[in-house]
Amino acid sequence: MTSLHKSTQLHNSYEPVVAVVVAAGSGVRLGEGGPKALRTVGGRALVAHAVDALAAGGAARVVVVGRGELAADFSRALGTAPIPWTLVEGGVERQDSVAHGLAEAARVVPSARHVLVHDAARPFVPAAVVSAVIAALRAGASAVIPAIPVVDTIRVADPRPGEATVVDRSRLRAVQTPQGFDLATLARAHDHVRSAGVAVTDDAMACEAIGVQVTLVDGSRDSLKVTEPFDLLVAEAVWRQRTAAIAERTSR
Ligand code: C5P
C-alpha cells in the first residue's frame, strides 16, 4: 500500500514522540462485523479512539499499521484525528506489523528518539498512562511497559510433577500498551529477534532478548484489550462513563 499522509503541524516542538498503532489484525475472535480496528464504540472506530488517547497523552504524530485493502476505510476513520498520521501496510505477524511501523516512524520523524507501540485493540488507555510511559522514557529508560496487578487466581493447567499448580499472583502483572522505547534500541531488538528466529509476543520481550532492562509503570483497567464480543460491551460502558463525566464537567 502506498502510505497515506495527513499533514498538519506537529504539536510538540521538542523531542517529538511518535506512536505506532498496530491495527492489521483480523480480529476473528470478535466475530462478525468487520475488522477489529474499524469496529466502532460511541460511533468512532477503535483505531481512532486509540489515536485520540495517544495524542491526549503527548504523542505528536502517529503511524497506523493497517491492512492495505482497507486503506480507504482507515482514512475515513482517521479523518478527524487530532495529530498527523501516516498509514502503512501490516505484516503477517504482529511483530512484522510493528517492524513496518518503526521503519515508517523513523522516516517521517527522523529526529524522533522515542517511540510508543500501541495496539488499536486498546482504545481507552488513559492519557495519564501514556504520559507516564513518555515521562519514564524522558527520564532515561530504554523500554517502558504499563502493567496492572492480576486479580484472578492463576493456575498452571498442566504442571510438571512437583510443581505448584497455583502461581503466586502477588508477583504477576498483566502487560498493556502503549509500550515505550528508545527508537534505535527497539529497531535493533527487532533486527535481532528476526535474524535469530526468537519468538516474542511483545516488543519489551524483543528488547530483553538483547539485554535491555524493562521499566514498569502503572497501567489501568480502563485500558482493556478488545478481543471478544463481551469486551466491546465493556468498552461501550467505559465510553459512556467517560462522555458522561466530560458532560458533567463542562456543564458546571
Ligand atoms: O491478535 P491480537 O489482538 O493479539 O493483536 C494485537 C494487536 O496487534 C491488534 O491491535 C492487531 O490489530 C495487531 N496486529 C497487527 N498485525 C498482525 C497481527 C496483529 O497489526 N499481523
Image (cartoon, rainbow, N blue to C red):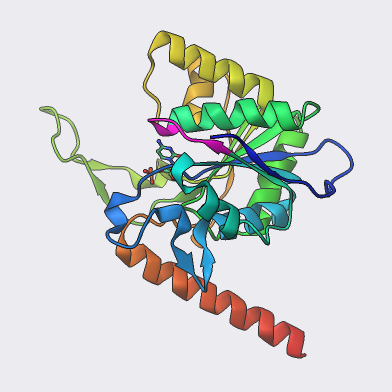
Residue 32 in the image: above or below residue 237: above
* Image side of residue 209 versus residue 108, left or right: left
Q: How far from the left and from the top, in percent, is residue 131?
A: 71, 49
Residue 59 in the image: above or below residue 56: above
Q: Residue at x 46, y 75 (%)?
A: 237
Residue lying furthest top: 196
Query: Relative to the observer, which residue lies in front, 150 or 133?
Result: 133
Q: Residue at x 51, y 55 (%)?
A: 73
Q: Residue at x 41, y 41 (%)?
A: 171
Can residue 225 be found in the magenta stretch?
Answer: no
Does residue 187 appear in the picture of this structure? yes
Q: How far from the left and from the top, in percent, is residue 179?
A: 57, 39
Does residue 67 appear in the picture of this structure? no
Can residue 92 be found in the magenta stretch?
Answer: yes
Q: Quadrant of ligand 1?
A: top left
Residue 92 in the image: above or below residue 57: above
Quarter of the image for the C terminus: give it. Answer: bottom right
Query: Which residues lie in the magenta part?
Result: 88-94
Q: How far from the left and from the top, in percent, is residue 139?
A: 77, 34
